[in-house]
Image (cartoon, rainbow, N blue to C red):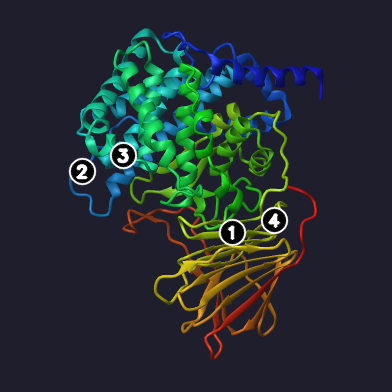
């Protein structure tokens, strides 16, 4: 590494720490201040030429150029009284997410490069968001609105902070006015209500909303008198409810694994800005609650450019919950807690720095769900943390959500099996899911057994109270054995590619060979399985620009109701990811 590159790394590491040690709030009229200061920008600019940051910047820049082709919104999407399939709710939600994502991404691109094209575009998006959504400043807050509106004003606040120098004084007044009016409305009529202010509101929605509200307060400290109260209230909520209880004791998010990542995003957004602006370091105070065990358990392989598929790089997760959603969190936690395994897994995301374009698009207005985590990934990434695995445990269970994961190694593309108490099973091998069953138990309530792992063999099962009705066994180094008991109906599983059938009960491709030891392969349908993206408890069917059918295999149980499938890896990757 060159002396110049070493110097940049030292400056970056020191600037990440010096600003956090401040005892006094930042100058109230100085911007940027949320995620970096003007004094830190030269080092962040120079880092674009160092290997780790250069890769993130390339993705960030490509997405910023894509954003330049988009036109800012000009019309408000008003809420409607009757919304039986939640189409209006999701039109508004995805529209605000889209506006926030583009605004923030362009703002980061400008701040991290100084490129006026990005700065002018970010200014336009900040102002457009203020004007298009200003009516929400007067609308009566409720849980349905707050989840989207709070995200939107957080995006405007971040944009305001980063493109402050490109706004005229009249435009700054306009932005401050919209943010202050909306935040004051929500503070009085939402965040101060007993059900929201009190201890029963502490999971995902609470973190997203209070974090966003708090970031707005931090952006406006010293400029809007009420901002200090907003920051105080958000910090109290974080320390009393959101950090101690927002995740289960085992580190899982009880509302779903994708909510683990999103919960962590919004924790980081607020905690990072709070420390920089006020000096209050919640990272140290609440380290034991910043648990990433779920990510360590579920990440299977690299994440590449292009549309995501379910289970593609993170098992038991939908398309928008893949490694590009997890990696920014891991980069931040690697920096914060100096854990190489986090940096190692984050490095598997080849898209780190880019906007996440999901195939979740509303059916009529075509509002697309976007996530802009790339700028955050750039400033959170610390190249002084090595990217490597160690002796971390390979098998992990999460009783709070009834899930368990058995990992063969810390090599990308290796065998990884996940099972959930609803009977869902995913086996990942050779870089893709080769076996996916969704909710296949036929009995009543079942429990997840404890994992047994002696280093050579790992085992976990589902028990119906009398017997183990499903067992998942990982026999290192090259196979997974799945066994079902008491089955009446056939078992159907899907996968990405159509396997060949060299023998009646053998399925084979370049990644694995599957042997049906008990039971019979009844059929292989090349396009037998279709995943329909739907939200609002399944009521709203979304438009999917890359809708795809997958191969479906049906296994008939034997006369005793047993099915046993042995999945043998064709080759174990020897090189680390």
Query: What number is the disc on residue 153?
Result: none
Can the viewer see residue 454? yes
Q: Which residue is mark 1?
A: 405
Could you tell me which residue is drawn at 55 percent across and 25 percent down? 109
- Badge 3, how many Cα within 10 Å: few under 14, some, many 20+? few
Between disc 1 and disc 2, the foreground one is: 1
Could you tell me which residue is drawn at 57 percent across and 16 percent down? 114
Can you name the residue that lies furthest to the bottom here? 559
> Residue 304: horizontal and vertical position, in percent?
63, 47
Between disc 3 and disc 1, the foreground one is: 3
Q: Tell me the element at label 2.
A: loop
> Residue 420: horizontal and vertical position, in percent?
50, 63
Can you name the residue that lies furthest to the left here? 81
Asked whether the beta carbons under mark 4 and mark 3 sit within 8 Å of each other, the answer is: no
Give the alpha-carbon distance from disc 1 to disc 2, as whole Å. Answer: 43 Å
Which tag, 1 or 4, sits closer to the chain's start?
1
């Amino acid at each position: 590494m060159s002396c110049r590159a070493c110097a940049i790394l030292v400056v970056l590491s020191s600037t990440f720490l010096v600003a956090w040690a401040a005892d006094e709030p930042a100058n109230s009229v100085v911007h940027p201040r949320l995620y970096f200061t003007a004094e830190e920008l030269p080092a962040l600019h120079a880092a674009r030429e160092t290997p780790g940051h250069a890769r993130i910047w390339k993705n960030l820049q490509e997405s910023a150029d894509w954003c330049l082709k988009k036109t800012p919104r000009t019309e408000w999407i008003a809420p409607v009284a009757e919304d039986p399939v939640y189409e209006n709710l999701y039109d508004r939600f995805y529209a605000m997410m889209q506006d926030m994502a583009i605004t923030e991404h362009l703002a980061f691109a400008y701040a991290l490069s100084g490129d006026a094209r990005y700065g002018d575009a970010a200014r336009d998006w900040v102002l457009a968001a203020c004007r298009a959504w200003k009516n929400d400043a007067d609308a009566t807050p409720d849980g349905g609105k707050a989840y989207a509106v709070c995200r939107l004003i957080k995006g405007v606040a971040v944009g305001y902070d980063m493109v402050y120098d490109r706004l005229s004084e009249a435009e700054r007044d306009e932005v401050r006015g919209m943010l202050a009016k909306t935040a004051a409305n929500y503070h009085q009529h939402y965040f101060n209500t007993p059900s929201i202010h009190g201890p029963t509101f502490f999971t995902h929605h609470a973190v997203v909303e209070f974090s966003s509200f708090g970031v707005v307060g931090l952006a406006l400290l010293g400029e809007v008198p009420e901002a200090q109260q907003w920051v105080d209230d958000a910090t109290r909520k974080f320390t009393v409810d959101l950090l101690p209880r927002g995740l289960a004791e085992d580190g899982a998010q009880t509302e779903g694994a994708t909510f683990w990542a999103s919960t962590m995003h919004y924790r980081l957004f607020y905690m990072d800005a709070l420390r920089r602006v006020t000096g209050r370091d919640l990272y140290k105070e609440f380290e034991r609650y910043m648990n990433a065990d779920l990510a360590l358990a579920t990440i299977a392989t690299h994440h590449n450019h292009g549309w995501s598929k379910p289970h593609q790089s993170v098992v038991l997760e939908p398309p928008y919950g893949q490694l590009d959603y997890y990696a920014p969190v891991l980069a931040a936690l690697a920096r914060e807690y100096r854990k190489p395994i986090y940096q190692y897994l984050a490095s598997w995301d080849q898209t780190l720095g880019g906007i996440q374009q999901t195939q979740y698009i509303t059916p009529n207005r075509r509002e697309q769900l976007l996530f802009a985590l790339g700028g955050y990934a750039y400033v959170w990434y610390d190249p002084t943390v090595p990217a490597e695995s160690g002796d971390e445990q390979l098998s992990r269970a999460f009783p709070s959500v009834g899930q368990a994961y058995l990992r063969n190694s810390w090599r990308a593309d290796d065998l990884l099996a996940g099972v959930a108490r609803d009977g869902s099973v995913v086996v990942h091998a050779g870089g893709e899911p080769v076996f996916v069953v969704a909710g296949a138990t036929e009995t009543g309530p079942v429990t997840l057994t404890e994992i047994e792992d002696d280093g050579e063999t790992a085992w976990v099962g589902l028990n119906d109270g009398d017997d183990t009705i499903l067992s998942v066994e990982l026999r290192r180094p090259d196979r997974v054995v799945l066994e079902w008991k008491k089955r009446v109906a056939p078992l159907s599983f899907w996968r990405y590619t159509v396997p060949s059938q060299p023998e009646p009960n053998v399925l084979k491709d370049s990644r694995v060979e599957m042997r049906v030891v008990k039971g019979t392969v009844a059929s292989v349908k090349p396009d037998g399985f279709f995943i329909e993206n739907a939200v609002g408890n399944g009521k709203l069917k979304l438009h999917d620009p890359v809708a795809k059918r997958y191969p479906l295999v049906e296994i008939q149980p034997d006369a005793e109701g047993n099915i046993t499938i042995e999945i043998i890896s064709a080759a174990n990757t020897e090189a680390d990811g």
